[in-house]
Amino acid sequence: MCDTSEEPALGYMEMVSSRDAATLLPIIQAHVKPGTIIWSDSWAAYSQINTLPSVQSHSAVNHSIEFMTSGGVHTNHIESYWNRAKIKLKRMRGCHRSQLPSYLDEFMWRERYGKTIDNVLDNIYRDIAIFFPV
């Protein structure tokens, strides 16, 4: 999922054992703010997103018909975010499946806090201090 209030959009990715509604809806609910407007594709598991308490509205685009609805609903931000993650993994020449969650975590952290080497060092020191107080 992506937060489009940032430029470029910042995302959240998580490995899941199943792509069904019972798996995905609790993850979505746990990571969206109250009043969130969600755009998605027409994957069946997303059909009940509008029932989540934090979701203000949900609109979907059916990619078998169009890539963007006449109302402007599209999935370009999440496609772009996932593409950036895949490029990172390809530059690494892939990774072992068991390590993929940690590489996705690192990718998400760097997208938020590690754009430059100075950002990486300052922010990793800050995060270490938060998680391992002396």
Image (cartoon, helix red, strand yellow):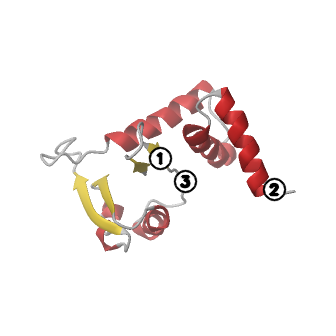
**Rounded to the nearest whole Å, what is the CA distance between mark 1 and mark 2?**
26 Å
Say which of 29 and 115 sits in front: 115
Task: Please say if the residues under marks 3 and 1 sit with CB atoms less than 8 Å apart.
Answer: no
Q: Percent position (x, y) of residue 115?
A: 58, 31
Task: Tell me which residue sits at (68%, 35%) in the image.
Answer: 120
Residue at left offset 63%, top offset 49% = 101
Real-space Cα separation, disc 3 to disc 2, in angstroms:
24 Å
When asked about the image quadrant of residue 46, the answer is bottom left
Identified at 67% across, 46% down, the residue is: 102
Percent from the top left, x then y, of residue 65? Answer: 16, 45
Q: Nearer the viewer, mark 1 or mark 2?
A: 2
Residue under pointer 1: 11
Q: Secondary structure at mark 1?
A: strand
Say which element carries label 3. loop
Q: In screen coordinates, is 11 left or right of 94?
A: left
Q: Which mark is residue 132?
A: 2
Tell me the kind of residue under disc 1.
Gly
Q: Nearer the viewer, residue 83 or 93?
A: 83
Query: For the residue carrying disc 3, how many other residues have a C-alpha within 10 Å: few (<14), some (14-19), or many (20+)?
Result: few
Amino acid at dot 3 = Glu
Dot 3 or dot 2: first in sequence order is 3
Instruction: Say whether residue 102 is left or right of residue 2.
Output: right
Task: Choose the circle earlier in sequence order: 1 or 2.
Answer: 1
| Label 2 SS | loop
State the CA–CA distance, disc 3 to disc 1: 10 Å
* Location of residue 87 in the rendering, given as x and y in whole percent from the top left corner: 52, 29
Q: Which mark is residue 14?
A: 3
